[in-house]
Amino acid sequence: DAGVIQSPRHEVTEMGQEVTLRCKPISGHNSLFWYRQTMMRGLELLIYFNNNVPIDDSGMPEDRFSAKMPNASFSTLKIQPSEPRDSAVYFCASSFEGPPLHFGNGTRLTVT
Amino acid sequence: AQSVTQLDSQVPVFEEAPVELRCNYSSSVSVYLFWYVQYPNQGLQLLLKYLSGSTLVKGINGFEAEFNKSQTSFHLRKPSVHISDTAEYFCAVSSSGSARQLTFGSGTQLTVLP
């Protein structure tokens, strides 16, 4: 298995632009997680899905952030409009009926 | 709610020496405990986990951890480290009733010196 695949690996955008991060979980996994990692705040859970349904989005910072999982093999995290304080590494992770076991290599987002 | 404290932000150690990375947690309910490793520019990998049963848990790459309920600790140990163990290590906790929702510690950077 190729593992959890995230794209792009790096994204540089200007403040105000829309950003879309993508994730393909491991086949057969039914739980998908989006995390954000910064030096100041460490690893934060943004949202997680179970069987494609959002279960807990209490970690989503504000309405500018949205996440979707249209099917079992794909999820997106969208930021619109983006702000410099959104700069971070965003990780996607997946598992089967449990906590995140497999993480992708992350998307490093820089908003200028 | 639960929280995790990793007492050391950086741990330098010489190759082939033993190492212990400390983790303490607080929770009012039963917990599951985890250690993850993050190599540069990569995502996290699960090293080991404690769900129930034996308090001594063995993981990958020769690491082990011991759950101590009375001291609310879950310290990670390895008897002899290699240069390749240089990475950041994260302790995490979840409640047994909500295993998917992990709370991570702030991480410990382990640097193995030649």
Image (cartoon, coloured by chain):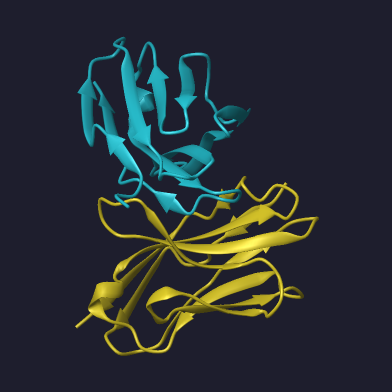
Chain colours: A cyan, B yellow
Q: Residue at x 41, y 33 (%)?
A: A73
- Report which quarter residue A17 is drawn in: top left
Q: Nearer the viewer, residue A75 or B82?
A: A75
Q: Quadrant of residue B82?
A: bottom left
Q: Is residue A16 above or below residue B102?
A: above
- Please say if A29 is above or below B5: above
Frontmost residue, B92 versus A31:
A31
Q: Is residue B76 something that shows in the picture? A: yes
- Quadrant that contains the C terminus of chain A: top left
Q: Tell me what residue is drawn at x 48 percent, y 80 percent.
A: B77
Q: Is B77 left or right of B81, judged from the image as shown?
A: right
Relative to the observer, which residue lies in front, A54 or A9? A54
Write the residue at 77% across / 60% down: B30
Q: Residue A91: x and y, percent? A: 39, 40
Residue A57 in sight from this viewpoint: no
The answer to which of A32 and A11 lies nearer the viewer is A32
**Furthest residue toward front:** A28
The residue depicted at 39 percent of the width and 54 percent of the height is B44
Give the residue at the far right of this rendering: B28
User: Quick check: B13 above or below B96?
Assistant: below
Quick check: B18 left or right of B85?
right
Q: Is residue A51 left or right of residue B19?
A: right
Count of numbered circles in the view: 0
Asked if residue A57 is positioned above or below residue B40 in the image, the reply reads above
| Residue B96 percent across, percent down from the top left | 73, 55
Image location (x, y in percent) of residue A39:
38, 44
Q: Position of residue A43 (x, y in %)?
A: 47, 45
